Image (tube, rainbow, N blue to C red):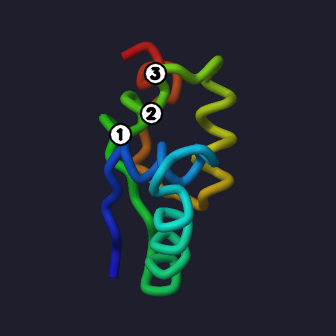
Amino acid sequence: MTTLLDTNILIYALGENEQHHHWAQEELEKRKSSGPLVIPEIVYCEFSIGMPSQEAVDVAVGALGLERYASPNEALFRA
């Protein structure tokens, strides 16, 4: 089953000081075993706020094993 993710789960999963960090990590691992984890383009855009660069966003998305529909990263980052 495909799981569509919200921006908050990404923030929680990557923010070690976030209150829900461990829960988010556990949930992502559970969901990965059921199918792909997908973020819509707007989540990519929202998540990029506060990140130092497009490359940092791409590294974080890749580290979590997320998929998204193809759109140019530069356009999404600038949005």
Q: Are marks 1 and 2 in contact (CB under 8 Å)?
A: yes
Residue at the limit of the structure toward the bottom, as seen here: 34
- SS under mark 1: helix
Estimate how packed mark 1 is, as few (under 14), some (14 to 19) or many (20 or more) residues with alpha carbons within 10 Å.
Answer: some
Q: Are marks 3 and 2 in contact (CB under 8 Å)?
A: yes
> How far across and how far down the image is residue 68, in percent?
43, 51
Residue at image position (61%, 24%) is 54
Based on the displayed image, in which of its 4 quarters is residue 37 positioned?
bottom left
Q: Is residue 29 left or right of residue 2?
A: right
Q: Is residue 36 left or right of residue 41?
A: right
| Cα distance in 3D space between marks 3 and 1 | 10 Å
Residue at image position (51%, 85%) is 33
> How far across and how far down the image is residue 12, in percent?
48, 49
Q: Which mark is residue 47?
A: 2
Which residue does the numbered mark 1 point to in the structure image?
A: 43
Q: Quadrant of the N terminus?
A: bottom left
Of marks 3 and 1, which one's residue comes earlier in the chain?
Answer: 1
Which residue does the numbered mark 3 point to in the structure image?
A: 49
Where 28 falls versus 21 (above or below)? Answer: below
Q: Out of 43 and 11, give the one closest to the viewer.
A: 11
- SS under mark 2: helix
Disc nearest the viewer among 3 and 1: 3
Where 29 falls versus 40 (above or below)? Answer: below
